Amino acid sequence: MSISRAKDMRLPLMNLVRLKGTPILEQLHLEERLLRASTDNWCIVNDGTNVPTIVMGLSGKPSQLLEVGPVIKDRIPVIKRFTGGGTVIVDKSTLFVSLICNKGDVPSVQPYPRSVMAWSGSLYGEVFEGVDGFQLRENDYVFGDRKFGGNAQSIIRNRWIHHTSFLWDYNVRNMAYLKLPSKVPQYRLERDHTEFVCRMKDYIERSDFVEKTVKAVGNQFAMKEVNLEDIDSYAKGEHVKSTRLLTVEELQEAMSGTAQSA
């Protein structure tokens, strides 16, 4: 037996699911299912989503975070996901990486947001090694003082998920659907969206990012690729389902409430 093979057998197993263009609602439903109804570790990589979609954190309020009128007029789907964190608009130029882990398989990480975040920052430090300006800054991944990766987490019992949307590129027009939130990172300094974020494509090739991410995860886990159609054998039984698409009626109510308070 080779040394590398022996090393792999001592590492915890990580199932890898590669997706391309999967709708973000479908991806989030999959993640919530795997977090709650599976006992395995998972790495899910989705290369873009099919249509522009707004994704809000579990406690997000459309009236505070969105330009609701234009969102309704342009029929932009709005999802409330099962994790916390901020609001983002995603599309085919967004890359997604989600890590679902058992506490016992990552003993260096305590099941608290700051500890998970520090671990992920170290992981992506490997991915962006040699890329000038990369750092974890107030829960964001940045190049210098401009954000390109937003994170969200959920911690349940002895398991947690950390998922990230990476702005490979973005459409400036889409950013106009988002309001400046009341609570922002200190380093943002009241900059608007286009001054605050940057494009990852200016720093790394798209395919290189995906492969380097898989390699970095593989330094800590024994990787096993799993096809989407085989998921049923890993996640069985009922589970809480909190990720959902907001209705037009809910958005109209949010817009009505905004108008009344103005």
Image: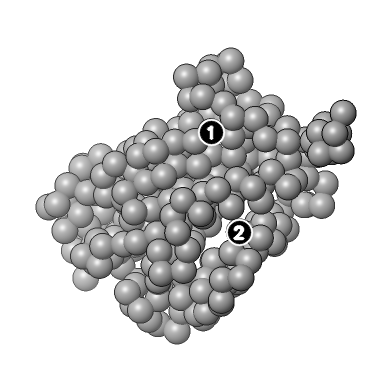
How crowded is the residue under tag 1: few (<14 C-alpha within 10 Å), some, or many (20+)? Answer: some
Indicate the quadrant where residue 224 lies.
top right
Q: Residue 192: x, y in percent?
A: 33, 77
Residue 125 position by quadrant? bottom right
Residue situated furthest bottom in the rendering: 189
Q: Amino acid at mark 2?
A: Val
Identify the residue at horizontal 51%, vertical 24% (top origin).
227
Q: Position of residue 114 (x, y in %)?
A: 69, 61
Residue 86 showing in the rendered view: no
Farthest front residue in view: 2
Residue 9: give its label. none
* Residue at image point 16% right, 58% down: 70
Q: Foreground: 10 or 235? A: 10
Q: Which residue is mark 1?
A: 17
Amino acid marked by disc 1: Val
Which image quarter is the N terminus in?
A: top right
Position of 8 relative to 142 (above/below):
above
Q: Say which residue label 2 marks.
A: 127
- Going 61% across and 59% down the picture, which residue do you hit? 127
The relative height of residue 31 versus residue 179 in the rendered view (above or below) is: above
Residue 42, given in percent of the width and then of the height, sits at 62, 35
| SS state under label 1 | strand
Q: Toward which corner of the image does residue 112 lie, by quadrant?
A: bottom right
Going by the picture, which residue comes out furthest to the left?
73
Choose the circle earlier in sequence order: 1 or 2: 1
Quarter of the picture containing the C terminus is: bottom left
